[in-house]
């Protein structure tokens, strides 16, 4: 018997998610219910922060898609329906299930008193109220998606704080008025800035969606507000006093991301206004709504690293998840995978050198972490949607699949595909099958082979290169050989690079693998040194060095979660596979630094410097972290020597130069959180 509460819990991922919990069985089957389309909401809601109370009245207009007498709406289990009316008459025969005995979760079932025909609009007026304090009644067992209190309030669409139908798919217009005590400012999503009106000791804020959307996203507190104009976007920030320090930086990151995606794909449905509102640490780290982003308070803590990549991905949800929705949870790849790929493509377009190399490699390694756990298509039905495995498969492997699709189609056709996808499904929901059909149309060939291999299957190829080097009569070198791989019927382009002696002697060519192998041929002036397959990490593949890296990365993920003993065990197991890996030694050093075992931290950071120095940014950061360890031991002389060595490298990955100079000016404080470069 599948757990209905868990099935209810899964639906949060349609809009945006933070990965928290662990294993989850497959989704429960949805029971048969009358189908209907909600078209409009008119809601009057009052927030009473001192009492944690919400009181609301809402007129809901819907169109039955089949003749029915019963309709069922989802509603947060902490809220109680006080009455339902139709055409001014009370409907007394309604039943509220505040727990959720089936896969729908907490809901209210209404008997309309008669059978209503299909395709004729029906309006119901609901009155409901309740205290919103804890996660109880909502879709997540440990995180609040709705809360009302003196320190700040928020109501997210996913919390089901108003009666709605068909989560994340049934878009509607809305006219929502929120009444709060004077002095409180309300932020929310809407087609334009809210209308504000004072009424005695209260203030009313009105939010209007004239175009159908996933509505009802509200935040309220005694906010500090700031408006930024970046390119063609207007960003409105609402933050708690004392948290203004990151507004400019977050505005810059989000503004650039929004502009980049607009240039790449077209305009989002939410328009040129974007709202960022602070919530608390009991809620999700980030949650995306139409034209709006909720961020938890801890993300404004200056001692924590800036979540730049997270912000870039959240911005992409305005296109993939908001402008284009999902037909079902099984189509999550079209939202999460495409948002992650969009953020990656932004970084790839702006980074250079070691930072670009590290970003490409990072995506590939993350995509391989749990690759065998499930295919991209099956992951939503078989993996916990908030687990590390789900994130690795749907987010990172999903992004790699889009990256490989770009390489397969070519940049121009891939760009055409995404723009056409956005245009055709703007304001609608799409499935993976529909996306595949569109891909086939744009490609001009049947793309079934690609989707069968990378979306519906698991398994990755391993490539080898056999080659010979001969000297030509002209004194040059000829490198001729064959790339081989181990999967049946693999079809895809592969980059092959020849490294040779001398400046500018690296050459790269693209061959197309058809089944098991393909030949290559290079001519160079300098002595060939090696042939490198997939030098820019464009293909989801496995190799000996990737096995080591993936094993180590599992340890890094555990380190980030604070599971130090298991993280150490995983990293040491990875080290057995490659004693030269600077990356493994570096992360062991980070583990010991976190535990204030400074001597072992110093040893491992030195081992990182003595290793293969891959990725290249480790040379700078290992010196910085050695300086941190010396500072923590009270040895300022050796600390400054280490920081100066970091400066001398000239490497500026993750702002290394500024960080080193900061510590040259001010010693590292082991009591402060210094997570840069981790």
Image (tube, rainbow, N blue to C red):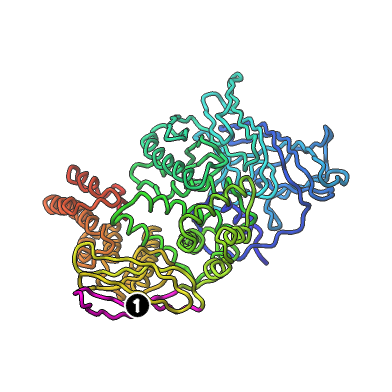
Q: Quadrant of the N terminus?
A: bottom right
Residue 606 at x, y percent in the picture: 19, 63
Q: Residue at x 30, y 75 (%)?
A: 576
* Residue 238 appears anywhere in the view: no
Instruction: Tell me: 8 left or right of 658.
Output: right
- Magenta residues, dominant SS class: strand
User: In the picture shown, does residue 86 fall above or below 611?
Assistant: above
Classify 2 as above or below 414.
Answer: below
Q: Which residue is mark 1?
A: 465
Residue 350 placement, left or right of 156: left
Q: Position of residue 295 (x, y in %)?
A: 47, 42
User: Magenta includes 478?
Assistant: yes
Query: Residue at 44% across / 47% down in the picture?
Result: 312
Asked whether 411 or 236 is in front, the reply is 411
Q: Nearer the viewer, residue 415 or 152?
A: 415
Q: Can residue 521 be found in the magenta stretch?
A: no
Residue beneath the point at 40% across and 48% down: 307
Q: Residue 101's quadrant in the figure?
A: bottom right
For this orientation, the residue located farthest to the front is 473
| Residue 82, quarter of picture | top right
Residue visible at 42% across and 66% down in the picture: 539
Q: Position of residue 6 (x, y in %)?
A: 61, 59
Q: Which residues are magenta?
A: 461-488
């Amino acid at each position: 018997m599948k757990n209905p509460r868990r099935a209810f819990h899964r639906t949060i991922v349609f809009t945006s998610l933070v990965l928290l919990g662990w294993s989850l069985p497959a989704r429960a089957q949805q029971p048969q219910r009358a189908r209907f389309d909600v078209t409009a909401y008119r809601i009057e809601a009052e927030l009473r922060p001192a009492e944690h109370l919400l009181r609301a009245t809402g007129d809901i207009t819907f169109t039955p898609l089949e003749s029915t007498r019963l309709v069922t709406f989802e509603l947060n289990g902490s809220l109680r329906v006080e009455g339902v009316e139709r055409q001014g008459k009370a409907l007394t025969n309604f039943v509220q299930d505040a727990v959720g005995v089936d896969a729908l979760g907490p809901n209210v079932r209404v008997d309309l008193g008669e059978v209503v025909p299909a395709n004729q609009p029906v309006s119901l007026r609901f009155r409901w109220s309740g205290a919103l304090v804890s996660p109880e009644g909502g879709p997540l067992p440990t995180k609040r998606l709705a809360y009302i209190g003196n320190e700040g309030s928020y109501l997210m669409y996913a919390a089901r704080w108003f009666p709605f139908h068909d989560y994340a798919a049934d878009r509607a217009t809305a006219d929502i008025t929120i009444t709060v005590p004077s002095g409180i400012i309300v932020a929310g999503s809407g087609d334009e800035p809210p209308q504000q009106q004072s009424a005695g000791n209260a203030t009313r804020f009105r939010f209007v969606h004239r175009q159908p959307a996933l509505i009802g996203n509200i935040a309220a507190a005694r906010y500090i507000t700031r408006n930024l104009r970046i390119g063609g976007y207007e960003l409105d920030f609402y933050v708690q006093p004392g948290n203004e320090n990151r507004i400019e930086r977050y505005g810059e990151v989000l503004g650039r991301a929004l502009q980049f995606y607009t240039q790449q794909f077209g305009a989002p449905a939410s328009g040129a206004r974007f709202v960022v509102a602070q919530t608390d640490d009991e809620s999700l780290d980030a949650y995306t709504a139409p034209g709006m982003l909720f961020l938890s308070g801890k993300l404004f803590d200056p001692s924590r690293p800036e979540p730049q990549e997270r912000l870039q991905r959240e911005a992409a949800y305005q296109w993939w998840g908001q402008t284009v929705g999902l037909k079902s949870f099984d189509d999550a790849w079209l939202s999460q995978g495409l948002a992650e790929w969009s953020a990656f493509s932004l970084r790839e377009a702006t980074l250079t050198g070691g930072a670009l190399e590290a970003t490409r490699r990072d995506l590939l390694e993350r995509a391989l972490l749990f690759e065998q756990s499930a295919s991209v298509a099956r992951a939503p039905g078989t993996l916990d949607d908030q687990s590390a495995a789900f994130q690795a498969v749907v987010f990172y492997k999903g992004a790699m699949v889009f990256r490989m699709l770009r390489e397969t189609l070519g940049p121009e056709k891939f760009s055409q595909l995404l723009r056409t996808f956005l245009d055709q499904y703007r304001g609608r929901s799409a499935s993976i099958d529909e996306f595949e059909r569109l891909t086939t149309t744009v490609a001009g060939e049947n793309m079934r082979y690609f989707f069968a291999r990378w979306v519906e299957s698991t398994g990755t190829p391993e490539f080898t290169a056999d080659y010979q080097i001969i000297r030509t009569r002209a004194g040059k070198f000829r490198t001729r050989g064959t790339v081989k791989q181990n999967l049946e019927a693999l079809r895809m382009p592969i980059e092959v690079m020849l490294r040779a002696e001398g400046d500018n002697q690296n050459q790269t060519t693209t061959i197309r693998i058809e089944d098991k192998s393909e030949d290559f041929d290079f001519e160079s002036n300098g002595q060939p040194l090696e042939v490198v397959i997939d030098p820019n990490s464009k293909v989801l593949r496995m190799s000996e060095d990737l096995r080591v890296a993936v094993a180590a990365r599992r340890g890094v993920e555990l380190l980030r979660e604070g599971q130090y003993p298991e993280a150490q065990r995983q990293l040491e197991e990875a080290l057995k596979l490659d004693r030269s890996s600077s990356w493994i030694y570096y992360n062991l050093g980070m583990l010991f630094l976190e535990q204030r075992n400074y001597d072992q931290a110093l040893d491992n950071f030195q081992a990182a410097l003595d290793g293969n120095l891959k990725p290249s940014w480790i040379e700078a950061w290992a010196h910085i972290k050695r300086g941190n360890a010396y500072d923590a031991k009270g040895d300022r002389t050796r600390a400054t020597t280490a920081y100066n060595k970091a400066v001398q490298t000239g490497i500026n990955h993750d702002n290394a130069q500024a960080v080193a100079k900061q510590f040259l000016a001010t010693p590292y404080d082991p009591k402060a959180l210094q997570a840069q470069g981790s």
